Amino acid sequence: MSFQAYLDNIHAKTGKTPEQFKTLATKAGVYKPDMKASALVAWLKEEFDLGHGHSMAIWAVFKDNGWVESPKAKK
């Protein structure tokens, strides 16, 4: 499955884009620029019934867009 297919499946299941997940995570108090992947994954599982792989695809978008700090940047 391609990365885009993961994102398409997530959108089909939830009706949400990564940008909308960021907005919702912010409103829920989950999102922070220094958050860990595990916090986002747990929230996506609880609120949207997303599995680990799909949640990590959303995490990848968060990282690629610079919405969360890379562990490498913290050193």
Image (cartoon, grey):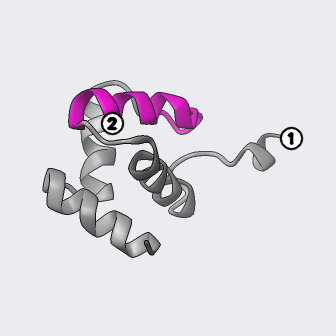
Q: Nearer the viewer, residue 11 or 29?
A: 11
Left of 22 or right of it: where is 61?
right
Residue 45 falls in which quadrant of the image? Answer: top left
Rendered-image quadrant of the C terminus: top right
**Residue in view at x 33 percent, y 46 percent:** 22
Residues in magenta, as a range: 32-48
Q: Secondary structure at mark 1?
A: loop
Q: Nearer the viewer, residue 44 or 68?
A: 44
Secondary structure mostly taken by the magenta-highlighted segment of the chain: helix
Instruction: Identify the residue position indicated by label 1 in the image.
Output: 75
Which residue is located at x 56 percent, y 46 percent? Answer: 68
The quadrant in which residue 74 appears is: top right
Earlier residue among tags 2 and 1: 2
Please tell me whether residue 35 belongs to the stretch shown in magenta.
yes
- Vertical position of residue 66 compared to residue 8: above or below: above
Q: What residue type is disc 1 on? A: Lys
Q: Residue at x 29, y 47 (%)?
A: 21
